[in-house]
């Protein structure tokens, strides 16, 4: 039986994440991401990109980690649960989707091109991860 929904999204941060402290001292970080879908233009045979913007939200130590390591343009991959917020009534009813990062957050600190002298010394240093601590080998 499947108990949770799970989504994986890879994209870029559109801005520096927002870290907030909420009731009880818990910390929450909101990350605005963009992921592009490539669509072939039949008239020109070129590919156009259609951006999809989505918010990802993480809590606790993962929130602090995200706030310290993500900047605008950082490539990241999130694994979590898709949630839908709804508000308003009738014609004014609105919906917004976000990912609650409950499983894993991976950050590519160097992106497509290394910046300045920050080139990694070892390929294993390139990606940083803040997973949920699972001991599973897959």
Image (tube, rainbow, N blue to C red):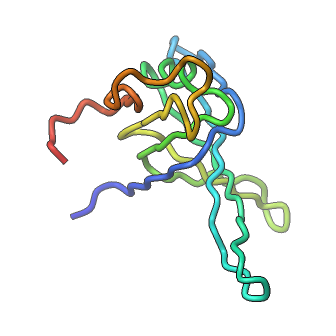
Decide which of 126, 60 is in the foreground and name it.
126
Identified at 41% across, 46% down, the residue is 79
Q: State the residue at coordinates (57%, 48%).
A: 11
Image location (x, y in percent) of residue 83: 53, 51
Q: Tag count in the figure?
A: 0
Quadrant of the rendering where the N terminus is positioned: bottom left
Image position of 67 (left or right of 95): left
Rendered position, 125 above or below 81: above
Q: Position of residue 32 (x, y in %)?
A: 66, 40
- Residue 88's spot in the image, x, y percent? 78, 55
Q: Residue furthest top?
A: 25
Residue located 43% across and 36% down the image:
105
Image vertical order of residue 64 relative to residue 109, above or below: above
Q: From what the image shows, is residue 92 above or below residue 119?
A: below
Farthest right residue?
A: 91
Along the line of sight, the residue nearer the viewer: 113 or 17: 113
Left or right, 50 with respect to 118, comes to: right
Closer to the camera in the image, 123 or 11: 123
Query: Up-down: is 97 above or below 59?
Result: below
Residue shown at 45%/39% (left/top)? 101
Q: Where is residue 133 shown, x and y percent of the image?
A: 25, 30
């Amino acid at each position: 039986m499947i108990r949770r929904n799970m989504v994986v999204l890879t994209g870029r941060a559109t801005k520096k994440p927002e870290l907030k402290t909420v009731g009880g001292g818990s910390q929450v970080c909101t990350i605005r991401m963009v992921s592009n879908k490539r669509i072939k233009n039949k008239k020109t045979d070129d590919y156009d990109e259609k951006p999809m913007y989505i918010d990802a939200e993480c809590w606790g130590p993962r929130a602090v980690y995200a706030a310290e390591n993500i900047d605008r343009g950082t490539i990241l991959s999130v694994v979590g649960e898709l949630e839908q917020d709804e508000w308003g009534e009738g014609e004014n009813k609105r919906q917004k989707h976000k990912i609650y990062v409950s499983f894993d957050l991976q950050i590519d600190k160097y992106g497509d091109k290394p910046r300045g002298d920050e080139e990694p010394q070892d390929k294993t240093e390139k990606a940083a991860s803040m997973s949920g601590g699972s001991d599973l080998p897959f």
